[in-house]
Image: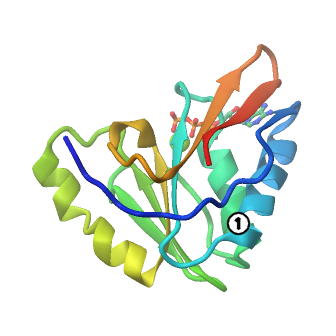
Amino acid sequence: MVVTFSSRSVATTTSRETSSPEETESAGEDLGRRLRPGDLVLLKGELGAGKTTFVRGIARGVGSTAPVASPTFQLVRVYPGRVQVAHVDLYRVESGAELRDLGLEELLDAGAVVVEWGERLDSPSATLISIEHLGGDRRLLRVERS
Ligand SMILES: Nc1ncnc2c1ncn2[C@@H]1O[C@H](COP(=O)(O)OP(=O)(O)OP(=O)(O)O)[C@@H](O)[C@H]1O
Ligand SMILES: [Mg+2]
């Protein structure tokens, strides 16, 4: 599955350890404050790593007050804010056709796009952030590609 988008670098710190959901959310908020339309952020990490928690912070960072939850049934949820954030979860997306139906290009025209299980998108210029479970409540957030 090959989908290519151009994007600019939005992540500044290269790695950060957190020890609570609030801290992960706050890291997301820092990123959210810098987001601009056209930015594509891919999130990578096992089940329960904290991807949705990070997105909750991103939404706060753009000033959105919408509740953030995994877009399990809709595949994409849109949060209006200073910059619109489209929250995509590719966990259940299996085909290129489904991926095209998401309308990622249009979403990038309208705002920023943040993708859980984002490593499934082949998008070499996108920002890629991994979240690794370090045991207990500790997580390592790492910018794999900015
Ligand atoms: N440091 C931390 N950072 C983020 N979440 C944490 C942390 N410590 C504990 N948690 C808990 O881990 C869980 C992370 O869930 P979350 O839905 O954000 O993960 P996810 O990566 O989106 O999972 P999924 O793959 O199912 O979508 C939450 O219950 C959260 O409270
Ligand atoms: Mg999630």
Residue at the location (48% across, 74% down)?
38
* SS class, disc 1: helix
Can residue 41 be seen here? The reply is yes
Amino acid carrying label 1: it is: Gly
Residue 76 in the figure: left or right of residue 47: left
Is residue 6 shown above or below 111? above
Residue furthest to the left: 97
Q: Please state the horizontal and vertical placement of residue 95, each as a whole percent of the image.
A: 14, 42
With 4 as the anchor, is 138 left or right in this view? Answer: right
**Residue 62 on image: x %, y %:** 70, 75
Residue at (39, 81) in percent of width and height: 109
Locate residue 66: give its quadrant: bottom right
Where 64 sits versus 88, above or below?
below
Give me the residue at 66% from left, 86% from top. 82
Do we see residue 117 in this rendering?
A: no
Nearest the viewer among 17 and 7 is 7
- Assess disc 1: are there few (<14), some (14-19) or many (≥20) residues with their C-alpha within 10 Å of its C-alpha: many
Query: Residue beneath label 1, please?
Result: 32
Q: Is residue 65 above or below residue 129?
A: below
